Amino acid sequence: EPEVTQTPSHQVTQMGQEVILRCVPISNHLYFYWYRQILGQKVEFLVSFYNNEISEKSEIFDDQFSVERPDGSNFTLKIRSTKLEDSAMYFCASSIGGNQPQHFGDGTRLSIL
Amino acid sequence: SQQGEEDPQALSIQEGENATMNCSYKTSINNLQWYRQNSGRGLVHLILIRSNEREKHSGRLRVTLDTSKKSSSLLITASRAADTASYFCATDANDYKLSFGAGTTVTVRA
C-alpha cells in the first residue's frame, strides 16, 4: 500500500540553525500538510498546501517556517532559525482531496540543543 | 476551538473484551476521522465518517457520529494485545486541516 515517507527520522540541531524536514507524499495525492506533536501533547496543525500554495496555516506557522514543493514528489518544511521550543515530532500528511482521509508519515523527531 | 476531546483518557481491558471511546467537538464539521498511534510512531488512519453519515464499520471497528450532540464513538470489538495504542479523533471543518483531541490510551491485557 502506498505510504507517506519522511526523512530523516531523527534530526538534532543547534539552536539558531536552519533545518529542512523532507516528505514524499503519496503520489496521486493533491493536498499536503504538516503537523507537529510536542512530547506528551496533542497533535497540532501547522500548514496545508494545495495547488502550489498555502491553503491555511496556524498561529504556530510564523515567519520562521516555510513550505515548498520543489519538484513533483517532495514536500519540505523549513525552519529558518530554530528555537528550543521547536523540539517536537513533525508529521507530514497527504490526502487525495478535501473531505478525504489524511495519511501520515512516521514523523521526524526534531531535537534542538 | 474546533478540537475533538476524547473520553476516557485511559482504558484498560482484557483481551477479547470490547473497548469504547468517545469524542466530543464544538463546531460544525465536514468529517471526523479516527487514528491510532503506537508509542513513538506515526498516526495510522482508521476510519473517516462524514457529517451526513451516522455509522460506519471497518473490520472490528465501529464508528458512530451524532452531529446533533456533536459527538462520535469508536468501538473496537474482540480486542487483541496488538490494539494497545493511543486513539485520537480528529475533526475536519474546512478540508484544509484536522483538529486533534488529546487521545485515549488503550491497554489490552493478555
Image (cartoon, coloured by chain):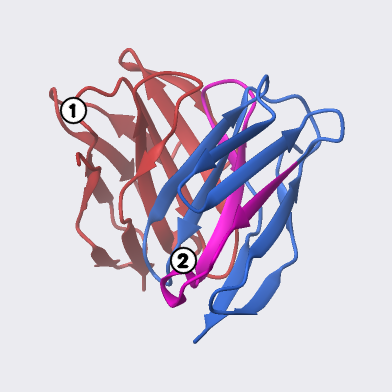
How far across and how far down the image is residue A70, in percent?
Answer: 16, 26
> Chain B shown in which color?
blue
Q: Report the disc number at residue A84.
A: 2
Looking at the image, the residue that sits furthest to the bottom is B110
Chain to which mark 1 belongs: A
- Residue A74 lies in quadrant: top left
Which of the two labelled residues, at mark 1 and mark 2, occupies the earlier sequence position?
1
Query: Split into 4 quadrants, where in the image is the C terminus of chain A?
Result: bottom left
Question: What is chain A's hue in the picture?
Answer: red
Q: Give, as a three-letter code, the residue at label 2.
A: Leu
Residue at screen point 71% across, 68% down? B9
Element type at mark 2? helix
Is residue B69 at least partly visible in the picture?
yes
Task: Locate residue B36 relative to residue B66 in the image: left or right.
Answer: left
Tell me whether circle 1 and circle 2 mark residues in contact (CB < 8 Å): no
- Depicted A102 relative to depicted A108: above or below: above
Q: Residues within 10 Å of mark 2 (few under 14, many from 20)?
A: few
Q: Which residue is mark 1?
A: A27
How far apart, in angstroms, are the residues tagged by discs 1 and 2? 34 Å
- In this view of the protein, can residue A61 be seen by the observer? no
Q: Is residue B59 left or right of residue B65?
A: left
**Chain identifier of the residue bearing label 2 in the image:** A
Q: Is residue A24 left or right of residue B51?
A: left
Across and down, in percent, residue A102 comes to 42, 35
Image point 61% across, 72% down: which residue? B17
Q: Is residue A62 left or right of residue B93?
A: left
Residue A111 among those drawn in magenta: no
Tell me: residue A6, above or below residue A71: below
What is the span of residues highlighted in magenta in the rendered image?
B72-99
> Label 1 crowding class (10 Å Cα cut-off): few <14, some 14-19, many 20+?
some
Q: Looking at numbered disc 1 in the image, what kind of residue is underneath it?
A: Ser
Q: Quadrant of residue A76?
A: top left
